[in-house]
């Protein structure tokens, strides 16, 4: 039987994973940075980044704007506790990236299947990532032909801070869901 503290920790860990993906897709490095402890260590493929979280955020600050759009979707997430303040978390990831002219994947879309292997630690009552490794399964480069953006919402990507999901609701600043257009 899971304790209330463990259920609360699981929810906090899951929310951190989701905020990370939102930060990537909205090019909001404050959200990305906010899910890591100050001394976190990141191990992505060597051609991308291995090192401190500050260096990782610097890398992403240059990399993410060079995509037309991205979408990071999390799948299975296994959370295993190692004492009251440490959790080992394996989370499956599917991510689509469409490169701009300035990216090495210029005008191409690449899909990534991977896993985040994280060590979360609770410090000062907050669960954040202390160590992260990206384990890439495989990637697929889609043919350039066949893509279209004729759906009316196709331009609502929000990579410039205009995403409707971050508009204030009912006077609460930073509420993550906009109801402005709800019936």
Image (cartoon, rainbow, N blue to C red):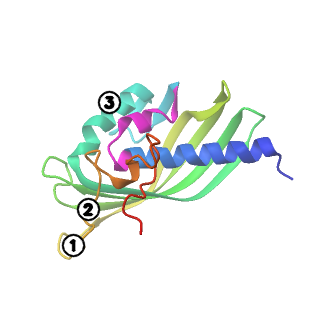
| Residue 148 is one of the magenta-drawn residues | no
Q: Nearer the viewer, residue 165 or 54?
A: 165
Task: Find residue 95 and report its horizontal and vertical position in percent.
Answer: 39, 58
Q: Secondary structure at mark 2?
A: strand
Q: Which residue is mark 3?
A: 58
Residue at figure coordinates x 25%, y 36% from the top left: 62
Relative height, residue 145 to residue 170 (above, below)? below
Is any atom of residue 54 visible in this view? yes
Q: Secondary structure at mark 1?
A: loop
Relative height, residue 76 to residue 65 (above, below)? below
> Which marked residue is nearer to the observer: mark 2 or mark 1?
1
- Contact between marks 3 and 1 (CB within 8 A): the answer is no
Question: Which mark is drawn over residue 109?
Answer: 2
Q: Residues within 10 Å of mark 2 (few under 14, many from 20)?
A: many
| Quarter of the image that includes the C terminus | bottom left
Looking at the rendered structure, the number of numbered marks drawn on it comes to 3
Left or right of 6? Residue 16 is: left
- Using the numbered discs, state the Cα–Cα distance from disc 3 to disc 2 in whole angstroms: 23 Å
Residue at figure coordinates x 24%, y 73% from the top left: 151
For marks 2 and 1 on the same chain, the one whose residue lies earlier in the sequence: 2
When asked about the image quadrant of residue 124, the answer is top right
Point out the residue furthest to the left here. 101
Question: Which mark is drawn over residue 121?
Answer: none
Q: Which residue is mark 1?
A: 147
- Contact between marks 2 and 1 (CB within 8 A): the answer is yes
- Using the numbered discs, state the Cα–Cα distance from disc 2 to disc 1 in whole angstroms: 9 Å
Point out the residue furthest to the right here. 1
Query: Which contiguous range is marked in magenta?
Result: 24-37
Q: Residues within 10 Å of mark 1 (few under 14, many from 20)?
A: few
For marks 3 and 2 on the same chain, the one whose residue lies earlier in the sequence: 3
């Amino acid at each position: 039987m899971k304790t209330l503290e463990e259920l609360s920790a699981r929810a906090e860990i899951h929310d951190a994973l989701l905020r990370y993906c939102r930060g990537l897709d909205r090019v909001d490095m404050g959200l990305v940075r906010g899910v890591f402890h100050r001394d976190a260590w990141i191990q992505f493929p060597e051609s991308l980044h291995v090192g401190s979280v500050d260096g990782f955020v610097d890398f992403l600050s240059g990399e993410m704007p060079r995509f037309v759009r991205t979408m990071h979707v999390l799948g299975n997430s296994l959370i295993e506790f190692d004492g009251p303040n440490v959790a080992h978390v394996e989370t499956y990831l599917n991510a689509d990236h469409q490169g701009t002219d300035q990216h090495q994947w210029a005008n191409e879309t690449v899909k990534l299947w991977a896993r985040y292997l994280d060590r979360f630690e609770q410090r000062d009552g907050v669960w954040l990532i202390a160590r992260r490794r990206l384990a890439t399964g495989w990637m697929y480069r889609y043919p350039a032909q066949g893509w279209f953006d004729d759906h009316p919402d196709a331009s609502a990507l929000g990579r410039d801070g205009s995403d409707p999901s971050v508009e204030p609701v009912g006077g609460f600043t930073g509420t993550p869901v906009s109801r402005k257009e709800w019936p």
